[in-house]
Image (cartoon, helix red, strand yellow):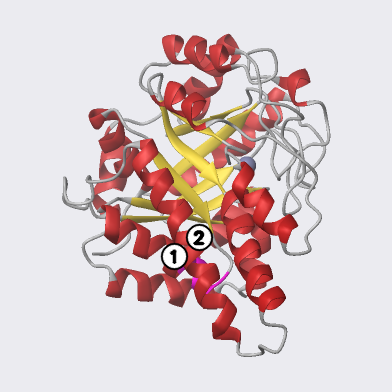
Amino acid sequence: MPMVSMRQLLDEAAKGGYGVGAFNVNNMEQIQAIMEAARETQSPVIVQASRGARSYTNDRFLYHLMMAATELYPEIPIALHQDHGNSPDTCKSAIEMGFTSVMMDGSLMADGKTPADFEYNVRVTREVVDMAHARGVTVEGELGCLGGIEDGHGSDADPLAHLTDPDQAVEFVERTGIDALAVAIGTSHGAYKFTKKPTGEVLVMERIEQINRKLPHTHLVMHGSSSVPQELQDVINKYGGKIKQTYGVPVEEIQRGIKHGVRKINVDTDNRMAMTGAVRKVLTEKPEEFDLRAYMKPAREAMKEVVKARMIQFGQAGHASDYKPIPLEEMARRYKETPVTV
Ligand SMILES: [Zn+2]
């Protein structure tokens, strides 16, 4: 199966009332872990790459690994998504490389750090929508700012200072024509999201419900949504790591979001922690070991188990063969029929 647009995956998820995990990748083992999890659970899947991942893989390695994934897992619908594009140029190069979806994060300036104003965000996002939709490619935008810095993106600011405003979200979606909207509700990138199990004061799920009431047909996206399970922290620390006690986004809160329009859930930290814990365990228990496969295989297996669990929890499991892929050309034709008019 060729790669499909993320829009199609999210439209199907909306019909079925489930969410789709978007998992970040940097190398072959992570792609393999996701694809095996998708096969075992029969899930459609979003694979995403940050700018850092694209430079780490020189783009071409990533591209060909993804081509291998489509060859080896023909029954799985896969969308390849640019995570946190910082400029129209970044999105353009992703589209030229074969990404079927891009995020234009105009909530921040091109440095990926400085909060941008609303008009800037509308302008750059609309520019990307015009360019992407002409090729049938999906666009995710972001309004409001998330906290934390991971992989060189994100704002340092207090995540509560810039929650997404529901009325502004309506204007943003109308003026840009985006397919999916990333909302700021108090989550952060990275491992250190909350210092205790989050309450509604710091993880403002209510905001998602308000936005969903005003924008019932817009696919919402939760960033920074790793759950950072205690057992993953414990494995790392048991084998010589130094992870400070931390709390992520509880899966039941994500499930609550899915009931209110959340269709894409970004997960990266949990997978990083699972792999790191597995590598540490092997190297600690067998310090004489130097065959990469001795630790990369269990690392890949550990990530697969986390991804499988999320696929089941988000509800995407079992939906891989529900629909036929729509070619990007056909998606482009549909966008042309219903242009953004504002
Ligand atoms: Zn993000």
**Nearest to N terminus: mark 1 or mark 2:** 1
Horizontal side of residue 260 vs 93, given as left or right = left
Horizontal side of residue 237 vs 85, given as left or right = right
- Could you classify mark 2 by the number of other residues whose Cα lies within 10 Å: few (under 14), some (14-19), or many (20 or more)? many
- Quarter-of-image position of residue 236: bottom right
- Could you classify mark 1 by the number of other residues whose Cα lies within 10 Å: few (under 14), some (14-19), or many (20 or more)? many
Residue 327 screen position, x and y as percent:
24, 55
**Ligand 1 lies in quarter:** top right
Are the two marked residues, 1 and 2, in contact with CB atoms closer than 8 angstroms? yes
Q: Which amino acid does the dot numbered 2 rest on? A: Met
Residue 69 screen position, x and y as percent:
36, 70
Q: Which amino acid does the dot numbered 1 rest on? A: Ala
Above-or-below relation of 258 to 7: above
Horizontal side of residue 52 vs 220, given as left or right = right
The verdict on residue 300 being magenta is no
Residue occupied by mark 1: 33
Q: Label 1's element?
A: helix
